[in-house]
Image (spheres, helix red, strand yellow):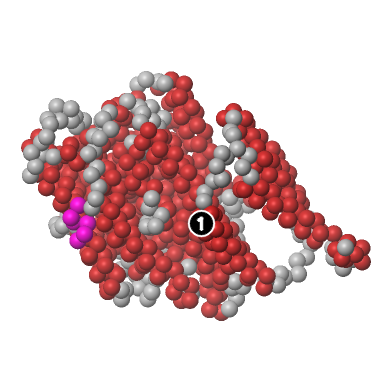
Amino acid sequence: MSLVAGVVLGAISIQWVAFLVLAVVAIAAALVVVLHRSPVVGAMGLVTNFLCIAGIYVLLNAYFFAALQVIIYAGAVVVLITFVIMLLNLQPEAKGGPGVVPVALAALLGLALIAVVGRPLLEYAAPEAGPPAPDFGTVAQVGEALFTVYFYPFLAVSLALLSAMVGAVLLAKRRLED
Amino acid sequence: MPEFQHFAALPTLVPAAFGLVFLVFAPFIGSDKKWMWAFTTAAMGLTILIPAIILSKIGLYGDVLETAGVAGQYMVRTDRLALWLDILFGIAGLLALLVTPAYLERANSHRPEIYPLFLIAVSGMTAMVGSDHLVMIFVGLEVLSITLYVMCGLARERAVQVEAALKYFLLGAFSTSFLVFGLALILGATGRLDIPGIAGAVLGVGAGTLWNETLLLAGLALFLIAFAFKVGAVPFHFWVPDVYQGAPTPVTAFMAAGTKAAAFGVLLRVLYAGFSGAETIVDRWAPVIAGLAVATMVVGNVLALVQTRVKRLLAYSSVAHAGYLLLALVPATSGAHAGEIVGGPALLFYLFTYTFMTVGAFIVAALFQSDREDADHFAQFAGLWHRRPLLAAAMGVFLLSLTGIPPLGGFTGKYVIFLSVLDAGHPVLAAIMAIAAVIGAAYYLRVLMLMFIAQPEEDLAARLVTPGPARLALAVAVVATFVLGIAPFVLYDPLLTVMRAAAF
């Protein structure tokens, strides 16, 4: 109730509320991906997570990246994952996965990492950010960065993708010949 | 618009371009793999020549050739460190290529596409070491890793090979996620991903301008974990024996020498140029590197004692050698001597000797491996001296060099690391290194005794063919091992300037 009242009174910005909702849903969806036994539900959790992250990009004025996030991740990547699940006809994990001790250990280490990384963030007083530059995150700006500063990494990424593709073709072709 | 000097990127662009062209032509060449192999070998030779030529001229252009960048973010930084390592990658690739056709023909998984992949892997390595920017280092590492996953998976005749490829792929992807998370934290702490920018932020620790040290250290820790995976340092070494065992042996040789050199090149540059500015930061990571080195040397050597297969033995020996190299990182990157004559050149010198001796040993193992599952079992090597004296002598040279017996390259390499560690004021670490090397001697000697003293159990000589290119590779490796042992100054003296302009 106090959140709604805060928004109405103008003490809490609507962006803050939107961020809170998106962040909570994103984390919950990520937990579903990791914890749920059915791979299809996991894939849907992944879509939800990607869409929430896209929403956070929008809040950061990075509209182009939000669009890319939806098209590439929530679109192409998850479609591919679902496709593989359907093709392989994956069943929900029969057993409960790893035992209690490894899970507890992993959770403990994860929480420790969150504590180490998160504590300084709580203390961090963000400088008052002005409005972003008018061309921030536009296609033109991203394109310019890609073909100037990040020219060589861009070349190298295409090389990496090419060898991944060659590998996929080679390995799949072998199967058919056998 | 910034102006590019693509000249500086030639060591990366040339193997990439040849790799691309050959990949396009692979389907047209069809069944005649000999041509593909010949072209690739020639291109690999050119890949060695280009950095060598640039290296001979580098003084004329200043110490660094780099592309212009925006806001001081240089993606390509071609200095002596990068060029020497580029030459090393080319040598590792060339030696492995020379034995590849014979091996794949016998393993019945000969595909022409593997040759261009060697070139693309080399271009990934050169991209990694020849850059000032963590994004470029990451992307280069991905080019290298993805290409190696494919090369590992090309031979899939037996279950152990499939297991190796899958294990390498999954654990490699796992370590990549560590790297990306680490880079994100470093970016969060410093606001920069270029090494000069990070170095500036680290310098700010003393002045109190870095807003958060914890975040930076957590990022560095994840970065180190990722690279410890890649070099196979204990406790991130579990994939090494299985992958080295299952991968096609020439690929294993290339992986053992090339990947290690690339990863150590990056570690040397990032730790020395990026994170050595503030003593409080160095005091955090230098003991971690030393601890990793000690664990890796001891565990690698002890586990190698109980192996009964040559490839697995060489895999554990490669873990142990990663330990010696990590130890060389300590004086090279931290303390008062960092970047001076000790350390950096010692690390590079050892990488060179290690390349010749380990690739040589793997080439001998590759000649043994046939369609039989247990072809590299110790029993196969019994009495090699009585059947193939030259082959046994070559393997003997490599194993003695790996042990560190004078007058071979492995001895001088270990000696310069030992001296540099002592010089930097770590007598305990130097003593542990000596003890580990003595433990290591036990298992190399076991194979040597088997080869030279035992009688052959069955006559394998008829099945053991040594084609011309493989003989050439072995001869080169033997000669280089001797030269680096008897006249180390031919390589060590030029290497002394290697750390010049590796930082700013």
Q: Where residue B416 sits: x, y (%)? A: 25, 64
x 78%, y 65%: residue:
A130
Mark 1 neighbour density, 10 Å: few (under 14) some (14–19) many (20 or more): few
> Is residue A138 shown above or below A165?
below
x 23%, y 38%: residue:
B376
Q: Where residue B160 sits: x, y (%)? A: 36, 36
Let me know if residue B307 is in the magenta part: no
> Is residue B57 shown above or below A74?
below
Q: Where residue A48 sits: x, y (%)? A: 72, 45
Closer to the camera, B260 or B498? B260
Is residue A178 something that shows in the picture? yes
Q: Is B47 situated left or right of A129 in this image?
A: left
Closer to the camera, A40 or A120? A40
> Is residue B266 shown above or below A162?
below
Q: Is B173 situated left or right of A49 in this image?
A: left
> Is residue A51 shown above or below B131?
above
Q: Where residue B387 sits: x, y (%)? A: 9, 35
- The quadrant where residue B435 appears: bottom left
Residue type at the position of mark 1: Val
Is residue A155 something that shows in the picture? no
Judged from the image, the secondary structure of the residue bearing numbered disc 1 is helix
Residues in magenta, as a range: B438-443
- What residue sits right under mark 1 in the picture? A101
x 66%, y 50%: residue:
A30
Q: Is B50 situated left or right of B380 in this image?
A: right
x 37%, y 66%: residue:
B291
Q: Chain of mark 1?
A: A
- The quadrant where residue B360 appears: top left
- The quadrant where residue A5 appears: bottom right
Magenta part, dominant SS: helix
